[in-house]
Image (cartoon, helix red, strand yellow):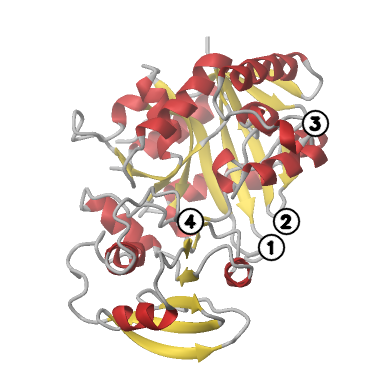
């Protein structure tokens, strides 16, 4: 059983114009503070001024320490200004239907139900029967960083993306019916051209019907926002802000890697890789994206190569070990480069909002020695890992499109 509760005190954009001015990508969608600062120069009213307050400064040289006292003080000040400003209104006891449509998949409506998920339902060692299943381990420093922001602002701005199987199709049908019945309350277009639309649900009878439909789901999988849900739980909050999407409408993009050579020559790297991978030279083509899982693109010394893991390099019965990101870490990052910690700062994880041309450009510029282009994890793989009560390998799932921060926020009493 999965529980959703209305947000007792929600802060929402007043209209579409306000939504476009206010909403922003999540804090973890950026490659650097510079990217955040540049976006804030173009859109200074957006919620990044709160969630990434250390970058809300006039000059790039003045960027503050992330999560430091001065940045948190600025977050609080900007949150108060937002609440008292003309872009938002406060509503009580709401759920919402949330739709995202990508220009790359214009015929697919990714639609979900937003509200409060329960922290008591998150599966942990202490709660092994929890019905909300995380897909990756939690880094305490990241969760604490989000907790400090929540504690300071007394608000949830970032939303957790949860997936449910909806095998009967009744849940998605109910959401489609609501969205088709009337125009949305407001919408926003993001930097990639994705259209985000919100229908606020305030009728008590309709709320109860949607709650009952979601309660039929045996489990929900945290697709994005593990640290945001962990931060709420660490603070002792009863709820976290979430949208529950049926898996049939969700889409994954690859999570790629930029890596150093650590003093090894291209010839040495290829020789070591040949132990665990079949290697096919593709030459100096401008880009390469694998077409299916267990195909890995390697850009090294100006040329692309296709790597296929040899049989026996992973356990096919283990859903987590079969993920390409796990194979890459075991046999390339750790096995060849000798870097055991996936959080090592020398490793750069590049989300699906950057393509293989970007990877190539960073290597050509000398910033990194090699790039790895992976195929997206499939929704079946994702669900299997969760069902086996395992964690996804770090930085292996990039759900696209992402939930837009600021479409609905929650104020905490």
For marks 1 and 4, give the CA distance.
25 Å
Q: What residue is pinned by disc 2? A: 193
Q: Secondary structure at mark 2?
A: loop
Confirm or deny contact between disc 1 and disc 2 (CB under 8 A).
yes
- In percent of width and height, residue 135 lies at 34, 47
Q: First in sequence: mark 3 or mark 1?
A: 3
Tell me the quarter of the picture where residue 347 sits. bottom left
Position of the N terminus by quadrant: top left
**Front: mark 3 or 4:** 3
Q: First in sequence: mark 2 or mark 3?
A: 3
Q: What residue is pinned by disc 1? A: 103
Q: First in sequence: mark 1 or mark 2?
A: 1
Q: Is residue 242 visible?
A: yes
Q: Rate crowding at label 4 as few (under 14), some (14 to 19) or many (20 or more) other CA atoms within 10 Å.
A: some
Residue 349: mark: 4
Residue drawn at point x = 67 percent, y = 19 percent = 74
For marks 3 and 4, give the CA distance.
28 Å
- In percent of width and height, residue 354 lies at 60, 62
Q: Secondary structure at mark 3?
A: loop
Q: What residue is pinned by disc 3? A: 58
Q: First in sequence: mark 3 or mark 4?
A: 3
- In percent of width and height, residue 124 lies at 24, 34
């Amino acid at each position: 059983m999965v529980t959703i509760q209305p947000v007792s005190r929600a802060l929402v954009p007043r209209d579409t114009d306000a939504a476009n001015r206010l909403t922003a990508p999540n804090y973890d969608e950026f490659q650097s503070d510079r990217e955040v600062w540049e976006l804030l120069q173009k859109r200074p009213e957006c919620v990044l001024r709160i969630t990434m307050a250390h970058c809300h400064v006039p000059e790039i040289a003045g960027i503050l320490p992330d999560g430091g006292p001065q940045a948190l003080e600025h977050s609080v000040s900007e949150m108060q200004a937002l609440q008292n400003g003309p872009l938002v209104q406060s509503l009580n006891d709401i759920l919402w239907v949330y739709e995202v449509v990508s220009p790359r998949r214009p015929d697919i409506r990714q639609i979900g139900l937003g509200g409060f998920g329960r922290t008591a339902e998150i599966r942990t060692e202490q709660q092994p029967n929890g019905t909300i299943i995380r897909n990756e381990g939690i880094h305490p420093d990241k969760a604490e960083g989000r907790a400090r922001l929540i504690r300071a602002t007394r608000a949830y701005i970032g939303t957790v993306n949860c997936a449910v199987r909806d095998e009967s199709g009744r849940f998605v049908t109910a959401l489609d019916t609501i969205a088709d019945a009337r125009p949305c309350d407001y919408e926003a277009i993001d930097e990639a051209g994705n259209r985000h639309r919100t229908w606020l649900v305030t009728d008590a009878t309709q709320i109860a019907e949607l709650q009952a439909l979601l309660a039929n789901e045996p489990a929900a999988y945290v697709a994005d926002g593990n640290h945001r849900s962990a931060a709420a739980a660490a603070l002792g909050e009863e709820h976290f802000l979430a949208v529950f999407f049926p898996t049939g409408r969700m889409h994954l993009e690859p999570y790629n890697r930029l890596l150093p050579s650590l003093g090894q020559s291209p010839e040495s790297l290829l020789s070591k890789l040949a132990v665990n991978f079949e290697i096919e030279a593709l030459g100096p083509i401008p880009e390469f994206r694998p077409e299916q899982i267990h195909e890995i693109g390697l850009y090294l010394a100006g040329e692309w190569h296709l790597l296929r893991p040899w049989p026996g390099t992973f356990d096919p019965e283990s859903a987590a070990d079969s993920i390409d990101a796990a194979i890459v870490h075991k046999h390339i990052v750790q096995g060849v480069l000798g870097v055991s910690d996936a959080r090592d700062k020398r490793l750069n994880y590049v989300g699906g909002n950057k393509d293989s041309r970007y990877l190539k450009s960073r290597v050509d510029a000398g910033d990194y020695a090699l790039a790895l282009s992976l195929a997206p994890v499939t929704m079946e793989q994702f669900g299997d890992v969760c069902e086996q009560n395992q964690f996804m390998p770090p930085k292996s799932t990039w759900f696209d499109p992402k939930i837009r921060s600021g479409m609905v926020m929650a104020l905490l009493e």
